[in-house]
Image: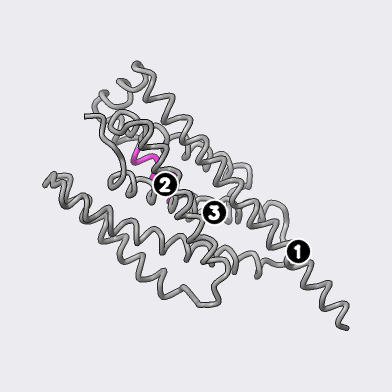
């Protein structure tokens, strides 16, 4: 009986590790696509002028990005795994286009150093979410309220154009996305542990894509907030 129990635990651990590894692999691929696209567009004058100086085009791209996220969240159970993968890939490329401005606004060295700080911070929060025994559900709810506040404050600051307000938003944003990283990681751990043994490859892939999307958004937003704090301006 003990041998069977040990075998079952080992099998569950292998399943969990495989799922989590798949999530982080897809997140890494998306980050690489975003980074490459952002760098390429920023250093291609024709493309940069097209995307940022064509009236309404950037707004259309941002709306398209939001559409991809909402569509994936709402339809993930009904679409094919290949479709979910394609949408996630296209989304990461679109996000790279809209983020290309950072290579114009901030120095390359400060972007690189901030990315390193972000990666270490994200990794620490993710590890905490993976190993903690504390239920982070209440933390996640609190951080979601903080995220709503950040969105409202950011919209207001578009009109106010206050550098002090932007700095406050950035510091609060760092705390919010650190909390969300830990919370989302714990959710992934729970998801992998409760995934049925008869789950198909398609179900596992779609779960991994949604997990990767959540962590990708946490990482990207944490990076942007840190960049506003630590980034060196080219001006």
Residue matched to label 2: 220
Does 25 sit left or right of 234 as displayed?
Answer: right
Q: Is mark 2 on a helix, strand or loop?
A: helix
Does 188 sit left or right of 181 as displayed?
Answer: right
Q: Which of 226 and 15 is in front in this view?
A: 226
> Residue 79: horizontal and vertical position, in percent?
58, 49
Q: Which of 207 and 25 is in front in this view?
A: 25
**Total number of numbered discs in the rendering:** 3
Q: Is mark 3 on a helix, strand or loop?
A: helix
Of discs 2 and 3, which sits in the foreground?
2
Q: Earlier in the sequence, mark 2 or mark 1?
A: 1
How packed is label 2: few (under 14 Cα within 10 Å), some, or many (20 or more)?
some
> Residue 44: horizontal and vertical position, in percent?
38, 18
Against 174, residue 106 (above or below) is above
* Residues rendered magenta in the picture: 62-71
Residue matched to label 3: 210
Q: State which quarter of the image contains the N terminus.
A: bottom right
Magenta residue check for 66: yes
How packed is label 3: few (under 14 Cα within 10 Å), some, or many (20 or more)?
many
> Residue 125: horizontal and vertical position, in percent?
48, 61
Residue matched to label 1: 198
Q: Residue at x 47, y 36 (%)?
A: 34
Q: State which quarter of the image contains the C terminus.
A: top left
Q: Earlier in the sequence, mark 3 or mark 1?
A: 1
Magenta residue check for 22: no
């Amino acid at each position: 009986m003990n041998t069977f129990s040990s075998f079952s635990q080992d099998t569950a651990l292998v399943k969990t590790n495989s799922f989590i590894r798949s999530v982080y692999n897809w997140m890494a691929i998306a980050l690489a696509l975003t980074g490459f696209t952002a760098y390429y567009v920023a250093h291609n004058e024709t493309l940069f002028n097209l995307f940022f100086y064509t009236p309404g085009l950037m707004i259309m791209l941002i709306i398209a990005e939001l559409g991809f996220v909402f569509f994936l969240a709402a339809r993930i159970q009904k679409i094919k795994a290949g479709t979910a993968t394609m949408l996630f890939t296209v989304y990461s490329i679109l996000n790279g286009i809209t983020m290309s401005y950072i290579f114009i606004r901030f120095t390359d060295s400060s972007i690189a150093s901030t990315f390193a700080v972000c990666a270490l911070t994200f990794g620490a929060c993710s590890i905490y979410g993976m190993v903690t025994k504390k239920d982070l559900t209440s933390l996640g709810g609190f951080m979601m309220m903080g995220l709503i506040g950040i969105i409202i404050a950011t919209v207001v600051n578009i009109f106010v154009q206050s550098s002090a307000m932007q700095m406050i938003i950035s510091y609060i944003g760092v705390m919010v996305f650190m909390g969300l990283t830990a919370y989302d990681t714990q959710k992934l751990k729970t998801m992998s542990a409760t995934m049925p043994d008869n789950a198909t490859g398609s179900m596992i892939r779609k779960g991994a894509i949604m997990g990767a999307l959540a962590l990708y958004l946490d990482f990207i937003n944490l990076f942007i907030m840190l960049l506003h704090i630590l980034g060196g301006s080219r001006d």
